[in-house]
Image (cartoon, rainbow, N blue to C red):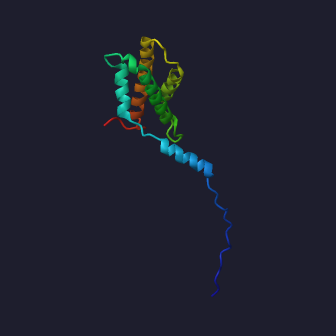
Amino acid sequence: MSATVAPERQVEEWTPALDADGLRNVLERFKAWKPLDVERIFDDLDTAIGNQPPPVATTVALVERLRSHLKHLSDIAVADDRYPPTEEMLRLVELGRPLREERTPVDHQKAVGLARRLAFVTSDLVEELIEAHYIKGAE
């Protein structure tokens, strides 16, 4: 009986996908990552579009939080090519872009108006993402 020996296969040497700086960057992003807090989003939406206008002292901070929520939700909507966003998601992301970039007015009433416009777009987007199972609703 003779034994047959398979020819040696040439295998390319493995190289890491990221260098040390790239890995540090990924680590820093993981450390800075904060999970999506849907309950906080709904609290801020309620503050912005509830029965009472937000207090003068907290309106600027509310606008900034709403901008942050809208940015985070917009990123979620378009993040994965395997699950493309719906037409409505894309519409809301595009509608939210100029609102996120708009300067916060000094006048309280105008700042409340901006907060409410941000809140309506954010509310529609969060509901769309929940309905499409991109995120979980508040528990």
Q: Is residue 5 above or below residue 112?
A: below
Q: Is residue 100 above or below residue 3?
A: above
**Residue ranking furthest to the front:** 57
Quick one: 120 or 90, which is closer to the camera? Answer: 120
Q: Quadrant of the N terminus?
A: bottom right
Q: How many marks?
A: 0
Residue drawn at x 37%, y 34% as measured from the top left: 38
Horizontal side of 17 relative to 137 (left or right) equals: right
Examine the image and state in which quarter residue 12 appears: bottom right
**Residue ranking furthest to the bottom:** 1
Horizontal side of 21 relative to 139 (left or right) equals: right
Give the percent coordinates (x, y) of residue 80.
52, 40
Examine the image and state in which quarter residue 56 appears: top left
Give the percent coordinates (x, y) of residue 132.
41, 35
Give the percent coordinates (x, y) of residue 53.
35, 16
Quick one: 79 or 59, which is closer to the camera? Answer: 59
Q: Quadrant of the C terminus?
A: top left
Residue drawn at x 43%, y 15% as measured from the top left: 113
Give the percent coordinates (x, y) of residue 71.
49, 30
Quick one: 93 or 35, which is closer to the camera? Answer: 35
Residue drawn at x 32%, y 16% as measured from the top left: 52
